[in-house]
Image: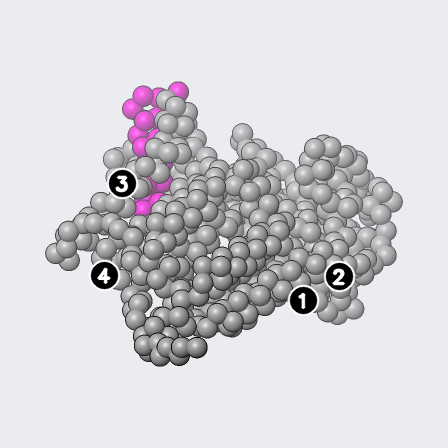
């Protein structure tokens, strides 16, 4: 037997570099964890695809995973050099993601579950290659955030605010050209033509794709950090300015060539034309910034995010797979437990069915109607009432109450801020106010084809009257955890504002009807032991 004294460097290399077979096992373990995570979060991910398909402003979502894959593949050699000691912090991140996912299931807010999937990817990265790989892969993985749509109630509120800003900016630009124009809420009145600045004109369909593009541009822009931050933050003002310019251009078109030109201009300057103009402005901004700093304008992928290859510590073979195996176990546990959480029996309180709701309320006589079958299927509600109540000689009040026995699987009342514009009505005024100290509600003036209506609505969440959608979701999560309940309802009242009456007359009519409604409605909406109002 011969005893060979191997050089110290040879022994170190043997300790650092595992065999090819071991590398294959480790990579297969990471791949298995990733595939299992896709199955565990499948409901949340399928909801993403549905939103990308049905909402134009999120249609770019299909490109985001492809771009992320391209970013990672283009930097594969640098990422490989950054693979270091696996970190058990990755296991902690995956455990945190599991908690986020369960919160999303309990609160019916898919945003939590979708973000949890990205957190899981970060955890797998840490468990596979440690903090050195995590830092190198962080921004490409974080780019996936731009594929996640905002919750509907946030989407609607943001769209409404952008409509107002774009309308005011458009009218300001039109007046600079000495063209007479009036602004009534979101209606730009040009005399011969009234332009309604609705959801399609809010700028959201440009803002979200441009936000993704600006993030990507800031990532590959070879410039100081402050200039990258400016590029990222500039997408919002660019979108608003271009959208206001679009409205102004339509106003000028109508003034010069008549109202018949408006529809053609309106459609021509939608979609890709405005987006390309926004992207061009973004590129011009980057060029100016690079020239101001005295650098040549260039775009390239970062190498290894400042990772010093000599500082990357690789573990012994037997230690490499343990954090990954723990992550795989947690994701498998999520796959098993998720259906149990989503489908566990809830406390469904007893209540009266709206089929028996009184047809007469203190002098108000009701005339019930029904939703269209496809609308009822889309709303996925458990019970509802849709009826027109009228007092003798007075204008009718439309009552709509949508009740959901459970909101855990994503079915929840649709915000009128989404449904009203979706029905062709324009919200010209919106405010949050109170009937009295204990009853908040939302008040909106809507208009379509010259007809105006007054709308009151609020959410009844287990005995609480809530106007704010954010507070409604917060109570939903709290009650799901403490009461094992997620039932709730939307209450909406609508009445016509006649040309011969004031808004205050319609307000008085709705308030009078509410006084007759509330004593009866409480019997059909389950209450909580500790009801509060928000």
Whether the residues at callouts 4 and 2 have beta carbons within 8 Å, the answer is no
Q: Is residue 436 visible?
A: no
State how far apart marks 4 and 2 are (Cα). 51 Å
100 up-or-down from 421: above or below: below
Q: Position of residue 392 (x, y in %)?
A: 77, 38
In the figure, is residue 293 to the left or right of 389? left
Can residue 346 be seen in this snapshot? Answer: yes
Q: How far apart are the alpha carbons under marks 3 and 1?
A: 46 Å
The residue segment tinted magenta is: 236-260
Locate residue 428 relative to residue 348 in the image: left or right: left
The residue that disc 3 covers is: 280
Residues at marks 1 and 4, CA–CA distance in whole angstroms: 44 Å
- Between residue 272 and residue 494, name the one nearer to us: 272
Mark nearer the N terminus (3 vs 2):
3
Quadrant in the picture for residue 471: bottom right
Cα distance between the residues tagged 3 and 2: 50 Å
Q: Which residue is mark 2?
A: 485
Please say whether residue 299 is one of the residues in the magenta stretch: no
Q: Secondary structure at mark 3?
A: helix
User: Element type at marker 4?
Assistant: loop
Picture disc at residue 478: 1
Q: Is residue 95 above or below residue 107?
A: below
For the image shown, how many numbered marks are present on the structure? 4
Q: Is residue 239 magenta?
A: yes
Lower position in the chain sequence, tag 1 or tag 4: 4
Query: For the residues carrying marks 4 and 3, which lies nearer the camera in this image?
Result: 4
- Asked if 443 appears above or below 194 in the picture, the reply is below
Q: Position of residue 251 (x, y in %)?
A: 34, 31
- Judged by depth in the image, the label closer to the viewer, 4 or 2, is 4
């Amino acid at each position: 037997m011969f005893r060979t004294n191997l050089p110290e460097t040879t022994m170190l290399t043997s300790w650092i570099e595992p065999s090819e077979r071991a590398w294959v096992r480790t990579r297969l373990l990471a791949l298995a964890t990733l595939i299992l995570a896709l199955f565990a979060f499948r409901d949340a991910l399928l909801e993403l695809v549905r939103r990308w398909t049905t909402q134009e402003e999120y249609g770019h979502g299909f490109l985001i995973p492809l771009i992320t894959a391209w970013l990672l593949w283009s930097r594969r050699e640098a990422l490989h050099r950054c693979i270091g000691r696996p970190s058990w912090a990755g296991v902690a991140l995956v455990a945190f993601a599991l908690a986020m996912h369960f919160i999303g299931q309990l609160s019916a807010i898919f945003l939590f579950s979708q973000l949890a999937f990205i957190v899981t990817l970060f955890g797998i990265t840490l468990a596979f290659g440690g903090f050195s790989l995590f830092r190198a892969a962080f921004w490409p993985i974080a780019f996936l955030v731009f594929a996640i749509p905002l919750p509907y109630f946030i989407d609607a509120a943001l769209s409404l605010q952008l409509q107002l800003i774009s309308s005011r900016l458009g009218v300001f630009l039109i007046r600079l050209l000495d063209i007479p124009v009036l602004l009534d809420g979101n209606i730009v009145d040009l005399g011969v033509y009234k332009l309604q600045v609705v959801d399609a004109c809010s700028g959201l369909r440009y803002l979200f794709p441009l936000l993704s593009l600006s993030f990507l541009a800031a990532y590959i822009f070879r410039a100081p950090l402050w200039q990258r931050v400016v590029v990222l933050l500039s997408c919002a003002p660019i979108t608003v300015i271009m959208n206001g310019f679009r409205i102004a251009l339509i106003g000028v078109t109508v003034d010069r060539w008549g109202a018949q030109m408006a529809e053609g201009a309106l459609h021509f300057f939608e979609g890709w034309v405005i987006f390309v103009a926004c992207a061009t402005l973004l590129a011009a901004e980057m060029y100016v910034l690079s020239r101001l700093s005295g650098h040549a304008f260039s775009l390239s992928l970062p190498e290894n995010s400042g990772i010093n290859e000599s500082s990357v510590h690789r573990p012994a073979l037997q230690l490499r797979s343990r954090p990954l195996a723990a992550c795989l176990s947690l994701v498998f546990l999520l796959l098993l437990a998720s259906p149990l959480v989503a489908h566990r029996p809830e406390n469904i309180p007893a209540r009266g069915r709206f089929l028996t709701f009184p047809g007469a309320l203190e002098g108000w006589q009701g005339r019930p109607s029904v939703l269209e079958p496809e609308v009822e299927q889309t709303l996925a509600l458990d019970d509802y009432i849709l009826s027109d109540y009228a007092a003798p000689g007075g204008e009718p009040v439309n009552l709509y109450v949508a009740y959901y026995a459970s909101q855990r699987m994503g079915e929840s009342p649709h915000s009128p801020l989404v449904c009203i514009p979706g029905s062709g009505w324009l919200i010209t005024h919106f405010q949050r106010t109170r009937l009295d100290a204990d009853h908040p509600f939302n008040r909106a003036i809507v208009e379509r084809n010259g007809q105006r209506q007054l709308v009151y609505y609020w959410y009844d969440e287990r005995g609480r009257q809530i106007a704010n959608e954010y507070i409604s979701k917060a109570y939903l999560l709290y009650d799901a955890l403490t009461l094992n309940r997620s039932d709730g309802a939307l209450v909406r009242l609508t009445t016509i504002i006649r040309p011969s009456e004031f808004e205050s007359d319609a307000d008085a009519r709705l308030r009078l009807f509410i006084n007759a409604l509330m004593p009866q409605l409480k019997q059909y909406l389950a209450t909580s032991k500790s009801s509060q109002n928000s």
